[in-house]
Image: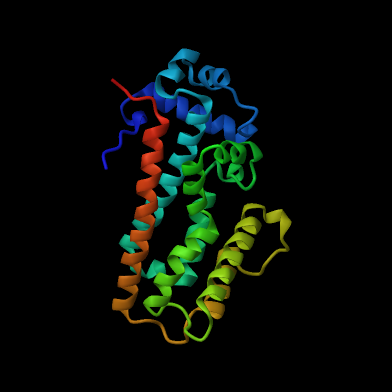
Amino acid sequence: MTTQLIERHSRKAARILDSARELVAEHGVRKVTISEIAATAGVGKGTVYLYWATKEDLILGLFARELLTFLDEVIARLTADPAAVLPHRLAPLLIRTGLRSPLAPRLPARDAELLRLLAGRDDDRALFERTRPSAMCQAVMPVLRRHGLLRQDRPLADQSYAMHALLVGFGTAMAEPGSAPPSAAEPATVLADTVAQLLEPADEPAEQSIAAAATDTAAVFHTTRDAVLDLITRSQTPQQ
Protein backbone atom coordinates (compact mmCIF):
# COMPACT_ATOMS: atom_id res chain seq x y z
CA MET A 1 0.00 0.00 0.00
CA THR A 2 1.35 3.41 -0.95
CA THR A 3 0.51 6.04 1.63
CA GLN A 4 1.60 9.65 1.62
CA LEU A 5 1.99 11.15 5.08
CA ILE A 6 1.71 14.76 4.07
CA GLU A 7 3.75 15.99 7.01
CA ARG A 8 6.77 14.29 5.45
CA HIS A 9 6.49 16.58 2.45
CA SER A 10 5.03 19.75 3.94
CA ARG A 11 6.45 21.65 6.90
CA LYS A 12 3.15 23.49 7.22
CA ALA A 13 1.22 20.24 7.52
CA ALA A 14 3.72 19.04 10.12
CA ARG A 15 3.26 22.24 12.14
CA ILE A 16 -0.53 21.91 11.91
CA LEU A 17 -0.39 18.36 13.26
CA ASP A 18 1.99 19.35 16.05
CA SER A 19 -0.26 22.24 17.03
CA ALA A 20 -3.38 20.08 16.94
CA ARG A 21 -1.67 17.46 19.10
CA GLU A 22 -0.62 20.08 21.65
CA LEU A 23 -4.05 21.72 21.83
CA VAL A 24 -6.05 18.50 21.94
CA ALA A 25 -3.79 17.07 24.65
CA GLU A 26 -4.38 20.18 26.76
CA HIS A 27 -8.03 20.98 26.07
CA GLY A 28 -9.70 17.93 24.53
CA VAL A 29 -11.30 17.54 21.13
CA ARG A 30 -14.48 19.57 21.63
CA LYS A 31 -12.84 22.82 22.75
CA VAL A 32 -10.23 22.99 19.99
CA THR A 33 -11.08 24.87 16.79
CA ILE A 34 -9.44 25.01 13.39
CA SER A 35 -8.77 28.73 13.97
CA GLU A 36 -6.83 27.96 17.16
CA ILE A 37 -4.86 25.20 15.46
CA ALA A 38 -3.99 27.47 12.55
CA ALA A 39 -2.93 30.33 14.84
CA THR A 40 -0.73 28.06 16.94
CA ALA A 41 0.85 26.63 13.77
CA GLY A 42 1.45 30.10 12.37
CA VAL A 43 -0.60 29.51 9.23
CA GLY A 44 -3.87 30.82 7.87
CA LYS A 45 -7.09 28.95 8.55
CA GLY A 46 -7.45 28.24 4.83
CA THR A 47 -4.08 26.50 4.83
CA VAL A 48 -5.40 23.85 7.21
CA TYR A 49 -8.22 23.08 4.77
CA LEU A 50 -5.69 22.51 2.02
CA TYR A 51 -4.69 19.34 3.87
CA TRP A 52 -7.85 18.34 5.78
CA ALA A 53 -11.35 19.13 4.58
CA THR A 54 -12.87 19.26 8.07
CA LYS A 55 -11.86 19.41 11.72
CA GLU A 56 -13.13 15.84 12.06
CA ASP A 57 -10.75 14.66 9.33
CA LEU A 58 -7.82 16.41 11.01
CA ILE A 59 -8.63 14.93 14.42
CA LEU A 60 -9.09 11.43 13.02
CA GLY A 61 -5.85 11.74 11.10
CA LEU A 62 -4.11 12.93 14.26
CA PHE A 63 -5.25 10.01 16.39
CA ALA A 64 -4.53 7.59 13.56
CA ARG A 65 -0.95 8.83 13.55
CA GLU A 66 -0.72 8.17 17.28
CA LEU A 67 -1.93 4.64 16.65
CA LEU A 68 0.59 4.26 13.84
CA THR A 69 3.42 5.28 16.17
CA PHE A 70 2.18 2.80 18.78
CA LEU A 71 1.98 -0.05 16.30
CA ASP A 72 5.37 0.73 14.75
CA GLU A 73 7.04 0.69 18.17
CA VAL A 74 5.47 -2.61 19.16
CA ILE A 75 6.30 -4.24 15.83
CA ALA A 76 9.88 -2.96 16.01
CA ARG A 77 10.32 -4.38 19.50
CA LEU A 78 8.92 -7.78 18.55
CA THR A 79 11.17 -7.87 15.49
CA ALA A 80 14.33 -6.87 17.36
CA ASP A 81 13.60 -8.97 20.45
CA PRO A 82 11.25 -11.91 19.82
CA ALA A 83 11.17 -12.76 23.55
CA ALA A 84 9.17 -9.55 24.03
CA VAL A 85 6.18 -11.61 22.89
CA LEU A 86 6.19 -13.59 26.13
CA PRO A 87 2.97 -12.56 27.89
CA HIS A 88 4.71 -11.17 30.97
CA ARG A 89 6.76 -8.89 28.73
CA LEU A 90 4.13 -8.13 26.10
CA ALA A 91 1.59 -6.72 28.56
CA PRO A 92 3.94 -4.06 30.03
CA LEU A 93 5.21 -3.29 26.51
CA LEU A 94 1.70 -2.51 25.28
CA ILE A 95 0.87 -0.28 28.25
CA ARG A 96 4.17 1.58 28.35
CA THR A 97 4.11 2.21 24.61
CA GLY A 98 0.54 3.43 24.71
CA LEU A 99 1.13 5.76 27.64
CA ARG A 100 4.01 7.48 25.85
CA SER A 101 1.51 9.13 23.52
CA PRO A 102 0.69 12.69 24.63
CA LEU A 103 -2.88 11.97 23.54
CA ALA A 104 -3.30 8.87 25.71
CA PRO A 105 -5.61 10.71 28.15
CA ARG A 106 -7.80 11.70 25.18
CA LEU A 107 -8.38 8.24 23.75
CA PRO A 108 -12.02 7.40 22.91
CA ALA A 109 -12.80 5.84 26.28
CA ARG A 110 -11.99 9.14 28.01
CA ASP A 111 -12.91 11.82 25.50
CA ALA A 112 -16.64 11.88 24.82
CA GLU A 113 -16.32 14.18 21.82
CA LEU A 114 -13.84 11.88 20.10
CA LEU A 115 -16.14 8.95 20.82
CA ARG A 116 -19.03 10.87 19.24
CA LEU A 117 -16.91 11.66 16.21
CA LEU A 118 -16.01 8.00 15.73
CA ALA A 119 -19.60 6.89 16.24
CA GLY A 120 -20.58 8.66 13.04
CA ARG A 121 -18.14 6.72 10.88
CA ASP A 122 -18.59 2.97 10.92
CA ASP A 123 -15.28 2.05 9.28
CA ASP A 124 -13.25 4.39 11.48
CA ARG A 125 -15.02 3.27 14.64
CA ALA A 126 -14.34 -0.35 13.76
CA LEU A 127 -10.66 0.42 13.28
CA PHE A 128 -10.29 2.12 16.64
CA GLU A 129 -12.21 -0.72 18.25
CA ARG A 130 -9.57 -3.11 16.91
CA THR A 131 -6.92 -1.29 18.94
CA ARG A 132 -8.71 -1.62 22.26
CA PRO A 133 -7.25 -4.08 24.80
CA SER A 134 -10.20 -6.45 24.41
CA ALA A 135 -9.81 -6.62 20.63
CA MET A 136 -6.05 -7.09 20.82
CA CYS A 137 -6.55 -9.88 23.33
CA GLN A 138 -8.98 -11.63 21.03
CA ALA A 139 -6.52 -11.36 18.14
CA VAL A 140 -3.23 -12.06 19.92
CA MET A 141 -4.06 -14.50 22.70
CA PRO A 142 -4.92 -17.38 20.31
CA VAL A 143 -1.49 -16.87 18.71
CA LEU A 144 0.25 -17.09 22.07
CA ARG A 145 -1.78 -20.15 23.01
CA ARG A 146 -1.07 -21.90 19.71
CA HIS A 147 2.68 -21.54 20.20
CA GLY A 148 2.65 -22.73 23.80
CA LEU A 149 3.17 -19.37 25.49
CA LEU A 150 0.01 -19.74 27.57
CA ARG A 151 -1.06 -22.39 30.03
CA GLN A 152 -3.12 -25.16 28.49
CA ASP A 153 -5.17 -25.99 31.61
CA ARG A 154 -7.46 -22.97 31.41
CA PRO A 155 -10.00 -21.95 28.73
CA LEU A 156 -8.59 -19.50 26.20
CA ALA A 157 -11.65 -17.29 26.64
CA ASP A 158 -10.91 -16.94 30.35
CA GLN A 159 -7.26 -16.15 29.64
CA SER A 160 -8.23 -13.48 27.11
CA TYR A 161 -10.65 -11.96 29.62
CA ALA A 162 -7.96 -11.94 32.30
CA MET A 163 -5.41 -10.29 30.02
CA HIS A 164 -7.96 -7.67 29.00
CA ALA A 165 -8.78 -6.91 32.63
CA LEU A 166 -5.10 -6.63 33.51
CA LEU A 167 -4.33 -4.30 30.61
CA VAL A 168 -7.27 -2.04 31.40
CA GLY A 169 -6.72 -2.05 35.15
CA PHE A 170 -2.96 -1.61 35.12
CA GLY A 171 -3.22 0.86 32.24
CA THR A 172 -5.53 3.07 34.28
CA ALA A 173 -3.44 2.76 37.42
CA MET A 174 -0.19 3.51 35.58
CA ALA A 175 -1.73 6.47 33.76
CA GLU A 176 -3.06 7.88 37.03
CA PRO A 177 -0.56 6.90 39.76
CA GLY A 178 -2.49 8.79 42.41
CA SER A 179 -5.52 6.56 41.89
CA ALA A 180 -3.74 3.42 43.14
CA PRO A 181 -1.98 2.53 46.40
CA PRO A 182 1.83 2.56 46.23
CA SER A 183 3.57 -0.70 45.37
CA ALA A 184 6.95 -1.96 46.56
CA ALA A 185 8.04 -2.65 42.98
CA GLU A 186 7.53 -0.73 39.76
CA PRO A 187 3.93 -1.17 38.50
CA ALA A 188 5.20 -2.68 35.24
CA THR A 189 7.12 -5.27 37.27
CA VAL A 190 4.01 -6.08 39.30
CA LEU A 191 2.07 -6.49 36.05
CA ALA A 192 4.74 -8.76 34.56
CA ASP A 193 4.77 -10.97 37.66
CA THR A 194 0.96 -11.14 37.73
CA VAL A 195 0.76 -12.16 34.07
CA ALA A 196 3.50 -14.77 34.50
CA GLN A 197 1.84 -16.34 37.55
CA LEU A 198 -1.65 -16.31 36.08
CA LEU A 199 -1.17 -17.12 32.41
CA GLU A 200 2.22 -18.63 31.58
CA PRO A 201 3.20 -22.31 31.67
CA ALA A 202 5.67 -23.52 34.29
CA ASP A 203 8.30 -24.34 31.66
CA GLU A 204 9.50 -21.59 29.32
CA PRO A 205 8.66 -22.34 25.68
CA ALA A 206 11.38 -23.31 23.25
CA GLU A 207 13.22 -20.51 21.51
CA GLN A 208 11.79 -21.61 18.16
CA SER A 209 8.24 -21.37 19.53
CA ILE A 210 8.91 -17.89 20.90
CA ALA A 211 10.31 -16.72 17.56
CA ALA A 212 7.30 -18.10 15.68
CA ALA A 213 4.89 -16.45 18.14
CA ALA A 214 6.69 -13.11 17.74
CA THR A 215 6.43 -13.33 13.96
CA ASP A 216 2.73 -14.18 14.03
CA THR A 217 1.94 -11.54 16.64
CA ALA A 218 3.77 -8.88 14.65
CA ALA A 219 1.69 -9.93 11.64
CA VAL A 220 -1.49 -9.24 13.62
CA PHE A 221 -0.25 -5.73 14.38
CA HIS A 222 0.83 -5.24 10.77
CA THR A 223 -2.73 -5.92 9.62
CA THR A 224 -4.04 -3.19 11.91
CA ARG A 225 -1.22 -0.91 10.79
CA ASP A 226 -2.32 -1.23 7.17
CA ALA A 227 -5.84 -0.21 8.16
CA VAL A 228 -4.49 2.79 10.09
CA LEU A 229 -2.50 3.93 7.07
CA ASP A 230 -5.62 3.67 4.95
CA LEU A 231 -7.52 5.84 7.43
CA ILE A 232 -4.75 8.45 7.34
CA THR A 233 -4.90 8.53 3.55
CA ARG A 234 -8.68 8.91 3.53
CA SER A 235 -8.59 11.68 6.13
CA GLN A 236 -6.26 13.86 4.04
CA THR A 237 -7.24 16.13 1.19
CA PRO A 238 -5.71 14.64 -1.98
CA GLN A 239 -2.64 16.63 -2.95
CA GLN A 240 -2.01 17.65 -6.53
Quadrant of residue 173 within the rendered picture: bottom right
In the rendered image, is residue 65 in sight?
A: yes
* Residue found at x 53% / y 83%: 154
**Total marks placed:** 0
* Residue found at x 47% / y 71%: 87
Q: Is residue 125 above or below residue 16?
A: below
Q: Quadrant of the C terminus?
A: top left
Please state which of residues 117 and 136 is positioned toward the viewer in this rendering. Answer: 117
* Residue found at x 66% / y 69%: 184
Residue 143 x %, y % = 39, 70
Quadrant of residue 159 within the rendered picture: bottom right
Q: Quadrant of the N terminus?
A: top left
- For the rendered model, the colour scheme is rainbow
* Residue found at x 47% / y 87%: 202
Judged left or right of residue 12, residue 102 is right
Residue 7 x %, y % = 36, 29
Residue 169 x %, y % = 64, 62
Q: Is residue 150 above or below residue 217?
A: below
Q: Is residue 222 above or below residue 88?
A: above
Please state which of residues 189 and 213 is positioned toward the viewer in this rendering. Answer: 213
In the rendered image, is residue 186 in sight?
A: no
Please state which of residues 116 and 114 is positioned toward the viewer in this rendering. Answer: 116
Please state which of residues 178 and 122 is positioned toward the viewer in this rendering. Answer: 122
Quick one: which residue is furthest to the left in this view? 2
Q: Is residue 115 above or below residue 83?
A: above
